[in-house]
Image (cartoon, rainbow, N blue to C red):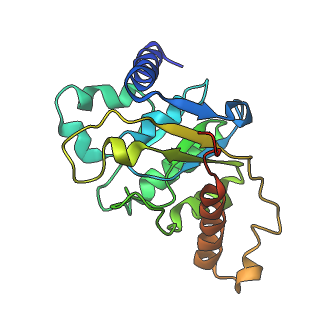
């Protein structure tokens, strides 16, 4: 973890705790060494750092290349483990970078839904995360964020200081059988979608405890 990353990691965690009563449930489940895909629902611009501060190691993120045009932020992104992607979401070079990063033993935050939910509800998964799983064979850590939509929903310019909680699920390990395209008629796209759907289902199963 670089000094710059650690600084903003600490700032993000402090802000989350002070203003959003941020909690992480079952943090002991997070894999802190080796290749890992942190797969989360996506409700808000807050989500990437919220997932990142759940882990004790530096993790990698995807961000739109257009953010480089924002003063200060554009200069900061390359120093906080950001992998840049074209706005249309079909940047294969970015996906290849993600695959290389995971294979190198790092953790990468990915959102199976691809974009922020417009109403806070879970959306269908896209095939991208399934491709990364198939190419890296990395374990997947499903996590679900509660409250970030209420704090800063898509389309809003107002922030509400509401509690945010992240629930960490059990790690998913994919077997050779899970990754066999022949089970999907040798259709790799179908395989990728199936893997993505499995991850999204695991995220959907995560709930806040009754007393939360």
At horizontal 49% and vertical 45% (from top left) the residue drawn is 146
| Residue 84 visible in the snapshot | no
Q: Quadrant of the N terminus?
A: top right
Q: Residue furthest front?
A: 211
Seen at 26% across and 37% down, the residue is 159
Q: Position of residue 15 (x, y in %)?
A: 38, 21
Q: Residue 211, located in which quarter of the rendered image?
A: top right
Looking at the rendered image, the quarter that the C terminus falls into is top right
Closer-to-camera residue (18/31) = 18
- Horizontal relation, residue 102 to residue 172: left or right: left
Q: Nearer the viewer, residue 151 or 48?
A: 151
Number of numbered discs on residues: 0
Q: Residue 149: x, y in percent?
A: 37, 48
Question: Quarter-wise, where is residue 184 in the image?
Answer: bottom right
**Up-down: is 103 above or below 182?**
above
Q: Is residue 33 left or right of residue 65?
A: right
Res 125 visible: yes
* In-front residue for pair 71/150: 150
Give the percent coordinates (x, y) of residue 163. Answer: 44, 35
Q: Is residue 158 left or right of residue 116?
A: left
Q: Tell me if residue 161 comes above or below residue 155 in the rendering.
A: above
Residue 55 is left or right of residue 171, and the answer is left
- Dividing the picture into quadrants, the one containing residue 106 is top right
At 21% across and 25% down in the image, what residue appears? 72
Q: Is residue 74 above or below residue 116?
A: above
Q: Position of residue 22 (x, y in %)?
A: 49, 29
54 versus 45 height, above or below? above
């Amino acid at each position: 973890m670089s000094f710059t990353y650690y600084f903003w990691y600490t700032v993000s965690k402090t802000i989350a705790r002070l203003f959003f009563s941020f909690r992480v449930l079952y943090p002991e489940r997070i894999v802190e060494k080796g290749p890992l895909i942190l797969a989360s629902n996506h409700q808000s611009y807050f989500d990437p750092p919220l997932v990142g501060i759940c882990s004790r190691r530096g993790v990698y993120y995807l961000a739109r290349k257009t953010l480089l045009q924002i003063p200060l932020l554009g200069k900061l992104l390359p120093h906080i483990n950001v992998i840049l992607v074209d706005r249309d979401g079909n940047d294969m070079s970015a996906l290849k970078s993600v695959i290389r990063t995971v294979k190198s033993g790092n953790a990468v935050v990915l959102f199976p839904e691809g974009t922020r939910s417009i109403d806070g509800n879970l959306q269908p998964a896209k095939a991208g995360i399934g491709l990364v799983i198939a190419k890296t064979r990395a374990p997947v850590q499903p996590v679900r964020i509660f409250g970030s939509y209420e704090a800063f929903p898509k389309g809003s310019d107002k922030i509400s200081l509401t509690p945010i909680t992240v629930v960490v699920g059990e790690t998913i390990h994919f077997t050779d059988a899970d990754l066999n395209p022949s089970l999907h008629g040798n259709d790799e796209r179908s395989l990728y979608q199936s893997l993505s759907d499995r991850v999204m289902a695991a995220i959907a199963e995560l709930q806040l405890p009754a007393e939360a």
